[in-house]
Image (tube, helix red, strand yellow):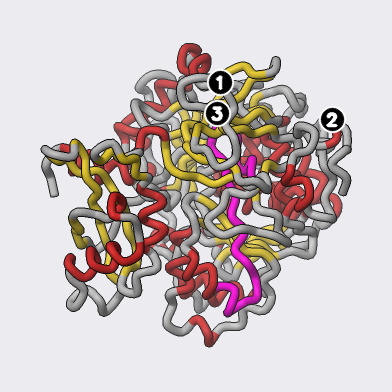
Amino acid sequence: MSEKQPTSRFGARPGAPHLKFWPKHAPYSLTLPRTSIYENLAISARRYPDKAAVVYYGSTLTYRQLRDEADRLAGYLMQDLGVAQGDFVLLYMQNSPQWIVAYYAILRANAVVIPVNPMNRTDELRHYVDDTRARVVICGQELWDQARPLMGEGDLANAVVASYGDYVTEPTDLTVPDAVAEPRRAVSGAGAAAWNEVLALGREPGPHVVGPDDYAVFPYSSGTTGAPKGCMHTHRSAMATIVGGTIWNPVSASGVVLATLPFFHVTGLQTSMNGSIFVGATIVLMSRWDRDTALELIQRYRVTHWRNIATMAVDFLSHPRIGDYDLSSLRGIGGGGAAMPEAIENKLYELTGLRYVEGYGLSETIAATHVNPPDRPKAQCLGVPVFDVDSRVLEVEGTAELDPGEVGEIVISAPQVFRGYWNRPEETAEAFVEIDGKAFFRTGDMGYVDEEGYFFLVDRVKRMINASGYKVWPAEVESLMYAHPDIQEVCVIASPDPRRGETVKAVVVPKAGAADRVTEDDILAWCRDHMSAYKVPRSVAFVDELPRSASGKLLWRVLQDRERGGAH
């Protein structure tokens, strides 16, 4: 591939070194559909009406059934609840066939999806109600008690309540989560209706009128401070990562995709759900992560693709009987959220012959902007900017671009970048910087680009530890510590120190069977042998588990706040 291609061909500056490693099967630039995301389901249902769209603990929903149920729910939203173009609808569920039906129903009704973390309680959910003034919530029955107190408070007036177990229609020998095994409850409360009764009405939706520039979905970014912020995405910006993901790591209608990441989070939403429906693949769906079930599903349904996060992969590959399962159907496995430890990546390769393909994205970019070339991935690497993405590394306080190897803030200009934060014009303005006449999103992530154009994450701008003037990046120390034979997981935080200002502390989850033998002195001695002195933790705390979000991301700030507050 020539580096003399015109810049308009690939959205990068002339001579960009990563173009040498561009996937041979992929174009430089994407031509995106000028249709709504709902149309992806409608088209796949016409192409593959009787094909399995979703396999859920042994039961199947075809593409025809999926579209028909989405249309019936859309008809109810429009006819009975008065949902109109541009209205917001809260989607508050665990992964389930109903989540998928509801998502496409909301879009079919010309409305905007507000995905809500199912771990949120009433007070947290109230923020979404107040921020969007949504009148309708679609929720799982196990979450109804959290949503019900908000009915009639503000604008929220109607709810559709679903029982996940209704979609497990066949006997199964698989382990089923409690929320799925629970029998359907009667729905009570003003404005509430049961999912099955709503679909039984058979309502027909009105005209579908939204297009690429209309709002489609507002995933909420947890950010680092304050309340979550709604990231405003159009059908066009969401389509960029839906289409791009299926081309970069190819998946087709013959694909079988294991969906273990939560759909309220952009990676699960775009890669596991929307990308699969765009090409007509089969989604093998789990409501909750369980490594035994995941192994069985891969073997039973000949799963070809699995997008996850590093913590899932670590747990999966640590299964003592993983060698007993047939994983030969896998054609692509990868993820993001945190760097994959090298030792774990090597184990995956030994088992499957596949390299773990890491990528990078945010709620503000509705999934990936950088992904490793599948034929030439680098370990612990974000990858290269994908289709039409211009990404640079800037000095933190300014707009000067840094040279390869220099650490600065990663910024992005791309079709998938959001329009801004809902109801937050000042924060939106602060999130962008103009360079060369283009708006770039400031990610808040510190990293560098190497001589070949691959991007590497160092840490969050606000996570750096300043120990006696030495800059310590926790993610780097964590990556090194994962090579310790007795460490299952680790989180590195800053600990106040009267002499150094801050010092390095490691919070460690020992591997099974190691808790009784490994000591703080053992860990510290090992670190002194494997890293620069200024990076070595000065103390180690052992815990049974690390705090995580519902999407599996490590909540390092929880540990950091405890440490600064004196709670150990």
Q: Which residue is mark 2?
A: 8
Closer to the camera, 485 or 336?
Answer: 485
> What type is the residue that disc 1 sits on?
Thr
| Disc with the residue nearer the chain's start (2 vs 1) | 2
The residue drawn where x is 41% and y is 33% is: 461
Q: Which residue is mark 1?
A: 399
Query: Is residue 5 placed above or below 298 in the rendered structure?
Result: above
Q: Which residue is mark 3?
A: 394
Q: Position of residue 108 (x, y in %)?
A: 69, 34
Closer to the camera, 272 or 111?
Answer: 272
**Image check: 92 left or right of 39?**
left
- Disc 2 on helix, strand or loop? helix
Q: Position of residue 460 (x, y in %)?
A: 42, 38
Question: Which region shows up in magenta?
Answer: 348-370
Q: Is residue 542 visible?
A: yes
> What type is the residue that disc 2 sits on?
Ser
